[in-house]
Image (tube, rainbow, N blue to C red):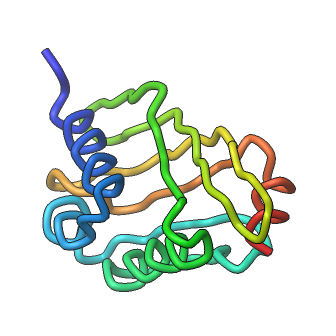
Amino acid sequence: MTHANEILARDSLAAFQRGDLDALREHSFAPNIRWHQPGKSLIAGDFDGPDQVIQLFVRLFELTDGTFSVAAHDVLANDDHVAELLTARGERNGKQLAENFVLTAHVADGKFSEVWVQPTDLYAFDEFFS
C-alpha cells in the first residue's frame, strides 16, 4: 500500500509539472511552510509561506523561459517525512541544466511544512541560475 505522504509528494510533483500552482498552494503547502533553497544564485534563499514558495516557482519558470522541469526517480515517505530523488532540467541563456537533487521535507497534517533542496552539484546549479 502506498503511504499517504508518498501520494502527497507525487501529486505535488504532478501539479508542479503541469504548472498548477494553485493546487500546490491549496493542497500541498502548510500555511507556515518554509522552503530552503541553497546556494548564491538568483533563486537561493529561505522562503516563508505558500506565497513566497509559489513566487520562487514562478521565478524558476521565468528564468528558464518555461523550460524548467522536474522528474522523479523515486519517492520515499513515512508518517513525518518525504525524500524525493529528482532530476531538474532546463535551458537558460544558452546553458543546459540536467542536475540530480534530493528534496527532503517534513510533513504535518498532510502537507509540506518544511522543505530542503540539495543539488548533487551546487556549483553547477548556482552557475545555471546566476
Q: Is residue 126 left or right of residue 18?
A: right
Q: Quadrant of the N terminus?
A: top left
The quarter of the picture where residue 52 lies is bottom left
Count all numbered tags in the image, as a single digit.
Answer: 0
Q: Quadrant of the C terminus?
A: bottom right
Where does the image place residue 34, in percent across and percent down from the top left? 43, 71
- Please name the residue shown 49% across and 77% down the image: 56
Q: Is residue 99 above or below residue 37?
A: above
* Front-lying residue, 67 or 23: 67
Where does the image place residue 33, in percent across and percent down from the top left? 35, 71
Where does the image place residue 19, in percent across and percent down from the top left? 31, 64
- Please name the residue shown 48% across and 47% down the image: 70
* Front-lying residue, 122 or 3: 122
Q: Is residue 76 left or right of residue 23?
A: right
- Please name the residue shown 54% across and 56% down the image: 116
Q: Is residue 18 above or below residue 119?
A: below
Task: Identify the residue at the far front of this view.
Answer: 94
